[in-house]
Image (cartoon, helix red, strand yellow):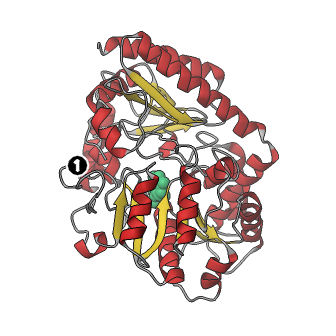
C-alpha cells in the first residue's frame, strides 16, 4: 500500500484523544496494517445507511463502506434482524451441519457460472489461501502466477509483489517476486511468478519458461486494489485459454467484485468460467463471512478430505444467517444491483467532469459500483500497477481526499483503494459528492 497520510481540517480532537488511548494497548492503534499505514486517526462513533459519524460528531457520506462489505450501507435492517433471529433462537456456534448452510450454498452454486461445490470460511484471506492450496493439490505443481497491484490477503502465500517497490521489482517484462512484509520467507516468494496485468504475452511467456510448474493463475477479474482497472477486452478469456492449454487452473478472486458487479459476480458480468472462485466482503453485508468454490472435479478433493481446509468459525451461524439474508435480498430484487450500477456510473462521470473542470488532469475509472479517481500526468487510462505508479499523482490524491473529507465525503485515503456505492446511496448523495468533488478540486489548487 502507498504511504500517504490523510490531511483534513475538520476537528478530530476527540478522535485523536481516543486514538492515543487505543494506541496505548493496541499496536499502532489499529488492528490493520493498511489503516495504520494511511495514518487514519479518525475514530468511529456510529453508522446509519450511507452515512457515518466520527466521535467528534462530524458526519460523512461513506463511499468506503468498511473496505467494501457494506453493500446495503451501515446497519442494514433485514440482515441485522436475520442474524439476531438466528443467534437468539438457535445459537451461535454449532460445528454441525445445519439447514441454512444448504440455502446459502445452493444460492452460490446457482448464481455463479461453473461452480458446483463450495466451502465456507471467515475471511477473504482464508478463501484465497484455501483456493491456492487446492490448486496445488489438484495439479501437483507449486508455482502461482499473480499480478502486481493485486491484493489477495496478507499471508505468506499471497502477500508477494502486491505493491512492490519498482526498484526491487525487476524489469517490466521480467518482474521479480518481492515479499510484501518483513517476516515473509524468501522461499515463499520464490513460488510466486508476478506479472503485469492486461498483458497476454507476459502470461504466455511465463508458461513457456516454466513448463509443467504452474499450478494456477490467480487474478481479480477487475483490478480493485490498484484503483479500479477493468480487463482489456478478451484478456480474461485469454487467461482461460492459456491455463487450459497448460493444465493449470484459473482462480478468480471475487472478494471485491462478488455480488456487486452482478449477483454472479464479475465472472457472470464478463462471461468467464474459472476453476475456482473466492468470495467475501459483500457476501455478508458487513458480517464476516467468506467462501470458495469450484468445479466438482476440483472441489472433490475437499469433499474427499484429501486437502486440509479448517477453521473453528467456518459456517458460523452469524456468517451464514447474514449471507443468506444478503443473497436472498439481492436475488429477489435485481433492481438493487441495477441501481448501484446507475449511481456508480453517474458518480464516475460526474467526478471526472468536476475535477477536470477545476483544471486537473484526471481520469475516473470504474465498473458500475466500483470506481476510482486518478490524478494523472495526462494519460487517459491506467492499465496496470506500473502505469499507476508512473502516471498517478498520489500526493494530489491525498490532498483531494482531505479536502473531500472536509466537505463531508469519506473515501479511503489510499490512492490505490476505490470508491464503493451501496444500495442506500441516493441520487442526492451522488449529487452532493460530485459538488463536493468540484469544491475540493478547486481548494487543492492545480
Ligand atoms: C481481492 C481481495 N482478495 C482478498 C482479500 C482479503 O480479504 P480479507 O480482508 O477478508 O481477508 C481482499 C481484501 O481487501 C481483496 O480485496
The residue sitting at 21% across, 63% down in the picture is 182
Residue 255, image quadrant: bottom right
Residue 96 can be seen, yes or no: yes
Q: In the rendered image, which residue does mark 1 sit on?
A: 166
- Foreground pick, 70 / 347: 347
Residue 170, percent across and down?
22, 55
Which residue is the extreme one toward the left?
Answer: 167
Which residue is the extreme one toward the right?
Answer: 332
- Foreground pick, 253 / 28: 253
In the shown orientation, is residue 120 left or right of residue 188?
right
- Foreground pick, 172 / 266: 172
Position of residue 5 relative to residue 377, above or below, is: below
Disc 1 CB within 8 Å of nearest ligand 1 atom: no
Q: Quadrant of the C terminus?
A: top left
Position of residue 235 relative to residue 425, above or below, is: below
The residue sitting at 35% across, 21% down in the picture is 403
Residue 40, percent across and down?
32, 39
Query: In the structure shown, which secondary structural element does the residue marked by tag 1 occupy?
Result: loop
Quick one: label 1, few (<14), some, or many (20+) residues within 10 Å? some
- Foreground pick, 6 / 246: 246
Residue 74, image quadrant: top right
Residue 153 can be seen, yes or no: no
In the shown orientation, is residue 92 left or right of residue 405?
right
Residue 172, percent across and down?
29, 50
The residue sitting at 42% across, 68% down in the picture is 207
User: How many marks overall?
Assistant: 1
Position of residue 423 relative to residue 438, above or below, is: below
Residue 360, percent across and down?
36, 16
Amino acid at each position: 500500500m502507498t504511504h500517504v497520510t490523510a490531511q483534513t481540517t475538520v476537528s478530530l480532537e476527540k478522535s485523536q484523544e481516543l486514538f492515543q488511548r487505543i494506541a496505548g494497548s493496541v499496536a499502532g492503534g489499529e488492528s490493520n496494517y493498511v489503516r495504520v499505514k494511511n495514518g487514519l486517526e479518525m475514530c468511529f462513533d456510529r453508522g446509519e445507511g450511507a452515512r457515518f459519524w466520527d466521535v467528534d460528531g462530524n458526519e460523512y457520506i461513506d463511499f468506503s463502506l468498511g473496505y467494501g462489505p457494506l453493500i446495503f450501507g451501515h446497519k442494514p435492517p433485514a440482515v441485522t434482524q436475520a442474524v439476531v433471529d438466528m443467534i437468539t433462537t438457535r445459537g451461535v456456534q454449532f460445528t454441525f451441519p445445519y439447514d441454512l448452510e444448504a440455502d446459502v450454498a445452493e444460492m452460490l452454486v446457482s448464481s455463479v457460472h461453473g461452480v458446483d461445490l463450495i466451502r465456507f470460511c471467515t475471511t477473504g484471506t482464508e478463501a484465497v489461501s484455501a483456493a491456492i492450496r487446492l490448486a496445488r493439490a489438484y495439479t501437483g505443481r507449486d508455482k502461482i502466477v499473480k499480478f502486481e497491484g493485486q491484493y489477495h490477503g496478507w499471508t505468506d502465500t499471497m502477500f508477494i509483489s502486491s505493491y512492490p517497490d519498482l526498484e526491487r521489482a525487476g524489469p517490466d517484462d521480467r518482474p521479480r517476486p518481492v515479499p510484501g512484509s518483513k517476516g515473509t520467507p524468501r522461499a515463499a516468494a520464490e513460488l510466486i511468478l508476478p506479472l503485469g496485468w492486461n498483458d497476454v504475452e507476459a502470461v504466455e511467456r511465463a508458461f513457456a519458461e516454466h513448463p509443467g510448474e504452474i499450478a494456477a493463475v490467480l487474478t481479480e477479474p477487475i483490478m480493485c486494489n490498484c484503483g479500479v482497472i477493468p480487463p482489456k477486452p478478451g484478456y480474461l478469456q485469454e487467461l482461460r485459454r492459456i491455463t487450459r492449454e497448460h493444465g493449470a487452473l484459473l482462480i478468480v478472486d471475487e472478494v471485491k467484485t462478488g455480488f456487486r458487479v452482478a449477483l454472479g459476480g464479475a465472472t457472470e458480468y464478463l462471461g468467464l468460467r474459472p476453476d475456482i472462485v473466492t468470495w467475501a466482503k459483500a457476501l455478508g453485508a458487513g458480517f464476516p463471512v467468506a467462501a470458495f468454490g469450484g468445479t466438482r472435479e476440483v472441489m472433490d478433493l475437499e469433499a474427499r478430505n484429501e486437502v486440509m481446509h479448517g477453521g473453528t468459525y467456518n459456517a458460523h451461524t452469524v456468517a451464514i444467517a447474514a449471507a443468506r439474508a444478503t443473497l436472498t435480498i439481492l436475488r429477489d430484487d435485481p433492481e438493487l444491483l441495477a441501481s448501484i450500477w446507475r449511481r456508480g456510473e453517474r458518480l464516475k462521470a460526474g467526478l471526472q467532469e468536476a475535477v477536470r473542470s477545476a483544471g486537473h488532469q484526471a481520469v475516473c475509472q470504474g465498473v458500475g459500483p466500483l470506481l476510482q479517481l486518478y490524478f494523472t500526468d495526462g494519460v487517459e487510462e491506467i492499465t496496470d500497477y506500473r502505469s499507476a505508479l508512473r502516471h498517478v499523482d498520489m500526493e494530489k490524491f491525498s490532498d483531494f481526499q482531505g479536502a473531500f473529507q472536509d466537505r463531508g465525503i469519506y473515501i479511503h485515503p489510499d490512492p490505490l483503494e476505490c470508491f464503493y456505492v451501496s444500495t442506500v446511496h441516493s441520487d442526492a448523495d451522488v449529487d452532493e459528492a460530485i459538488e463536493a468533488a468540484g469544491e475540493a478540486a478547486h481548494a487543492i489548487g492545480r
